[in-house]
């Protein structure tokens, strides 16, 4: 596995968890969002990938979770700010995007 592949694997896990929590709770957790933005900024600064590659990657992940593009979701859904306590209340299976079957 190349470093670039490893980077995208970690970013995928971070974004999936972040988007699943947003989708479930209708809240954004600023600390998590800032961490992810810092992770992305570092990779851009190190030329790990180009901007189009990153945008396509994020759009695809976003569509998998929300069923719409980033711009569509921004026009149609509003999220409140979550707190650390809110984050701790989210079940681990939701953070990982696992759907339970009954």
Image (tube, helix red, strand yellow):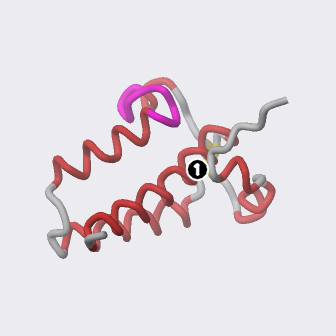
Quadrant (top left/top right/bottom left/bottom right) for the C terminus: top right
- Classify residue 8 as left or right of residue 100: left
Which quadrant holds residue 8? bottom left
Report the span colored magenta. 64-72
Residue 70: in magenta span? yes
Q: Which residue: 52% across, 36% down? A: 65
Q: Circle 1 sits in a helix, a strand or a loop, which is it?
A: strand
Q: Nearer the viewer, residue 64 or 90?
A: 64
- Foreground pick, 52 / 3: 3
Front in this rendered view, residue 33 or 58 = 58
Does residue 16 sit above or below 85 in this rendering? above
How far across and down, in percent of the image, does residue 22 sit?
Answer: 60, 44
* Residue under the image location 77 percent in, 37 percent down: 100
Q: Position of residue 63 (x, y in %)?
A: 42, 33
Figure quadrant of the N terminus? bottom left
Q: Look at 40% across and 26% down and name the residue there.
A: 72
**The residue positioned farthest toward the front in the image shown:** 1
For label 1, the residue is 28
Question: Crowding at label 1, few (<14), some or many (≥20) Cα neighbours within 10 Å?
Answer: many
Q: Is residue 46 magenta?
A: no
Quarter-of-image position of residue 7: bottom left
Q: Vertical placement of 77 versus 5: above or below?
A: above
């Amino acid at each position: 596995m190349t470093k670039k592949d490893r980077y995208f694997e970690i970013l995928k896990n971070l974004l999936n968890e972040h988007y699943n929590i947003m989708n479930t709770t209708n809240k954004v957790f600023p600390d998590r969002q800032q961490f992810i933005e810092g992770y992305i900024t570092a990779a851009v600064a190190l030329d790990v990938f180009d901007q189009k590659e990153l945008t396509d990657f994020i759009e695809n992940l976003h569509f998998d979770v929300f069923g719409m593009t980033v711009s569509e979701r921004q026009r149609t859904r509003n999220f409140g700010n979550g707190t650390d306590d809110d984050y701790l209340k989210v079940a681990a299976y939701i953070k990982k995007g696992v759907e339970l079957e009954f």
